[in-house]
Image (cartoon, rainbow, N blue to C red):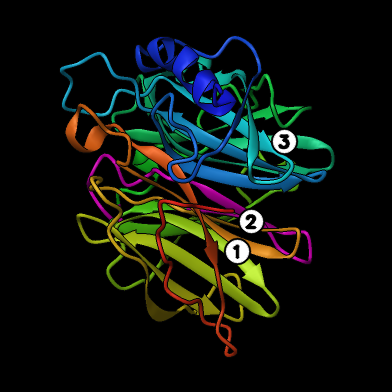
Amino acid sequence: MINKSKFIVLSFALTAFSGLSAQNDTTFIANGNPIIQYKYTADPGAMVHDGKVYIYAGHDECPPPKEHYLMNEWCVFSSPDMKTWTEHPVPLKAKDFSWAKGEAWASQVIERDGKFYWYVTVEHNTIPGKSIGVAVSDSPTGPFADARGSALITNDMTTEYTKIRWDDIDPTVFIDDDGQAYLYWGNTQCYYARLKKNMIELDGPIIPVSLPRFTEAPWIHKRGDWYYLSYASGFPEKICYAMSRSITGSWEYKGILNEIAGNSNTNHQAIIEFKGDWYFIYHNGGINTAGGSFRRSVCIDRLYYNEDGTMKRIQMTTEGVQ
């Protein structure tokens, strides 16, 4: 008997690994971790909307030999049950921003008032260094278009805190219970700023955040009265986290949440609640056959809490979500 999920994976393997974009909806059954085994995916951001989970991921392309990150576009996958997944046509590319010259790094999508806002990391074509842009769509699967016509954050806005060109990366956005939206981001230094209700303009100054062992990949989520700020730490990267009673801190460091993910120097997480359970979405190098740490794959495992609200350390599995 033909295993349908493996047949679908194999039928798309040649085109996907060669770096071609998805042109049509492709449905497959996740068979453990990594959940997507016909193309390389990385830096997952996740959102729950209207009974489905959406994962927005970068696409590690693979024309070997290339010992660096080659990322030109983002992918979107949806699932009603965390088992059956659909990849939708590519909704956004780095060069869809006229002011960007490429490099589709980490991102996150959030919904507000019926519109979907996608915060992304790209390389600016005139201001040296990484920048953060925002795209918008009426659908969680896109297509998305530049919402501003210019970058929301550029490297020259944060030089008083660090002189590196890649500190303005990895945006995460959170809308608090009072409706105020916040943008967090950073590398070596974490920052946050309030967003206006239109979600495409800052509403106040950029504020540095003091976090021990912070490298990159901040992610904000809330459970009960606790806010959680998880982030990549060290190199190779682990995921650590801090907790606070306020979205703006101060933050109390709580330790390691996820250990080094196999065959990947980087570690990038999204944390969501879906149908009463919590999930930790990340990447590893589980199907990596070329490119060292530069060909990554999205995985999902369960997340559990202790009675005091702290999070239990993630158990990374090959079985994934059953």
**10 Å neighbourhood of mark 2: few (<14), some, or many (≥20)?**
many
Question: Which is closer to the viewer, label 2 or label 1?
Answer: 1
State the residue lying farthest toward the bottom: 308
**Residue 116 bears which disc, if any?**
3
Q: The residue under label 1 is which amino acid type?
A: His
Image vertical order of residue 202 relative to residue 100, above or below: below
Which residue does the image show at 61% across and 81% down from the upper left? 245
Residue 233 percent across, percent down from the top left? 29, 62
Q: The residue under label 3 is which amino acid type?
A: Phe
Image vertical order of residue 246 relative to residue 161, above or below: below
- Name the residue that disc number 1 marks: 221
Q: Say what secondary structure mark 3 lies in.
A: strand
- Name the residue that disc number 2 marks: 174
Residue 83 percent across, percent down from the top left? 63, 42
> Label 3 to label 2, Cα distance in Å?
13 Å
Q: Magenta region: which residues?
A: 160-184
Depth check, front residue: 291 or 315: 315
